[in-house]
């Protein structure tokens, strides 16, 4: 008798439960856009009255003026910085620098005068130099000088201070002195265990085009955001803070210098744009504004975070405070001589 095999029963899986559709709650949802437009229409009366107030008119004037003046230099600086970081090999710097660290420091400092770049780009470039065997003292001198004395920054300073051309020379001299002094100071007092070997760059191994546009996007997002914050702070100081308060701080030489130096650390403005913010703080002396321009590209909140991430926290907590103190002192001395 033939035995017939039973056909295997087909196992039917239950369909997965329907997932909730979150499309309606995204920020780019037509529903959210419609709600925002309705709220804007309903609130147009109070918004119009607020914007027509004299204090807001003054605030908007200063904010727009700083942004319009600074934005072209910011974009140009970011493009040139990305091009140098991607297309100029770090081995070029290693070959160009002298073998003796004491001589390599000023040469690396002067290299910042011909290589445009903001502070966002100078940190990874300095890390690449150390990774390829350049003496740390020279790499740190380049890290401080490149965003402070490059042609884009000096040109922006000349445009921002048309009536004070000596500000360009004072910024160049003070920044270069601080960069070289910190390089020599590290060479003499720095210890190898304070400086963590920098990690491999996130753009290593990518194509040149992808690395270039990745660097541009990164710098525009960071530098542009800090420029907006800086322009807003400058506009608020001009429009909201009582004139007599600023006058009290500006009339005291020590307080004015320290106030703008600390403000530069907190605002963290890109060096291609900080001259226009400094020029708007006309209540303060040229020496105080010079301290703002010298400290900002060397010590600020974003730079501290980038230095800690590249070279280690032990390095940043020692290097940043020493740079701040030296930058303030050199700014005061340079201002007394040149301004």
Image: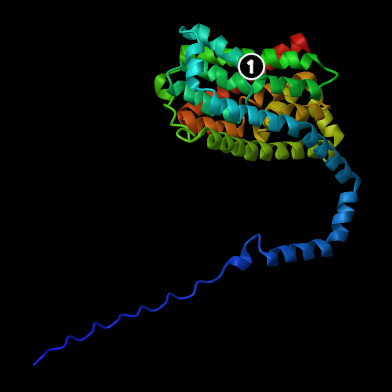
Query: Where residue 310 sits in the image (x, y, percent)?
Result: 48, 30
Residue 270 versus residue 323 in the image, above or below = below
> Is residue 13 visible to the viewer in this orientation of the structure?
yes
User: From this viewpoint, which residue is outermost toward the front?
Assistant: 2
Identity of the residue drawn at 56% across and 31% down: 304
Q: What residue sits 59% from the left and 37% below the top? A: 213
**Which quadrant does the C terminus fall into?**
top right
Q: Judge whether 45 appears above or below 99 on screen.
A: below
Q: Is residue 291 visible?
A: no
In the rendered image, the residue lying farthest to the left is 1
The residue beneath circle 1 is 114
Give the colour scheme shown. rainbow
Q: Residue at x 84, y 39 (%)?
A: 239
- At x 89%, y 54%, the residue is 49
Does 137 sit above or below residue 1?
above
User: Toward the viewer: 54 or 74?
Assistant: 74
Identify which residue, 71 or 255, lies in the foreground: 71
243 left or right of 149 in image? right
The image quarter in which residue 162 lies:
top right
Residue sticking out furthest to the bottom = 1
Residue 333 percent location from the top left of the image: 70, 12
Quarter of the rendering containing residue 276: top right
Residue 297 position within the rendered picture, expressed as x and y whole percent measured from the top left? 64, 26
**In-image side of 140 versus 170 (left or right):** left
* Secondary element at image label 1: loop
Looking at the figure, which quarter contains the N terminus?
bottom left
Of residue 311 and residue 244, the one placed in the foreground of this image is: 311
Tally of numbered tags:
1
Task: Give percent across and percent down for residue 211.
Answer: 53, 35
Q: Residues within 10 Å of mark 1 (few under 14, many from 20)?
A: few
């Amino acid at each position: 008798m033939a035995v017939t095999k039973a056909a295997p029963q087909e196992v039917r899986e239950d369909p997965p439960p329907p997932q909730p559709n979150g499309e309606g709650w995204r920020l780019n949802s037509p529903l959210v856009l419609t709600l925002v437009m309705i709220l804007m229409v309903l609130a147009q009366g109070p918004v119009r009255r607020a914007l027509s107030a004299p204090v807001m008119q003054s605030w908007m004037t200063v904010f727009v003026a700083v942004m319009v003046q600074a934005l072209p230099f910011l974009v140009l600086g970011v493009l040139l910085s990305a091009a140098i970081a991607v297309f100029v090999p770090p081995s070029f710097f290693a070959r160009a620098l002298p073998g003796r660290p004491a001589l390599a420091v000023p040469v690396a400092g002067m290299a910042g005068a011909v290589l445009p770049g903001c502070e966002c780009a100078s940190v990874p470039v300095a890390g690449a130099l150390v990774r390829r065997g350049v003496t740390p003292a020279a790499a740190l001198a380049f890290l401080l000088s490149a965003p402070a004395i490059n042609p884009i920054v000096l040109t922006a300073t000349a445009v921002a201070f048309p009536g004070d051309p000596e500000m360009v020379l004072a910024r160049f001299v003070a920044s270069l002195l601080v960069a070289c002094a910190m390089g020599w100071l590290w060479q003499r007092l720095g210890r190898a265990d304070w400086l963590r070997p920098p990690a491999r760059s996130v753009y290593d191994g990518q194509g040149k085009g992808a690395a270039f546009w990745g660097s541009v996007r990164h710098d525009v997002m960071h530098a542009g955001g800090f420029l907006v914050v800086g322009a807003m702070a400058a506009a608020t100081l001009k429009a909201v803070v009582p004139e007599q308060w600023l006058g009290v701080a500006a009339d005291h030489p020590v307080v004015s210098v320290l106030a703008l130096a600390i403000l530069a650390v907190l605002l963290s403005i890109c060096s291609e744009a900080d001259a226009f913010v400094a020029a708007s703080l006309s209540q303060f002396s040229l020496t105080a504004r010079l301290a703002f321009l010298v400290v900002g590209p060397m010590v600020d909140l974003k730079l501290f975070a980038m230095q800690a991430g590249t070279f280690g926290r032990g390095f940043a907590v020692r290097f940043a405070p020493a740079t701040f103190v030296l930058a303030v002192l050199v700014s005061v001395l340079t201002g007394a001589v040149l301004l």
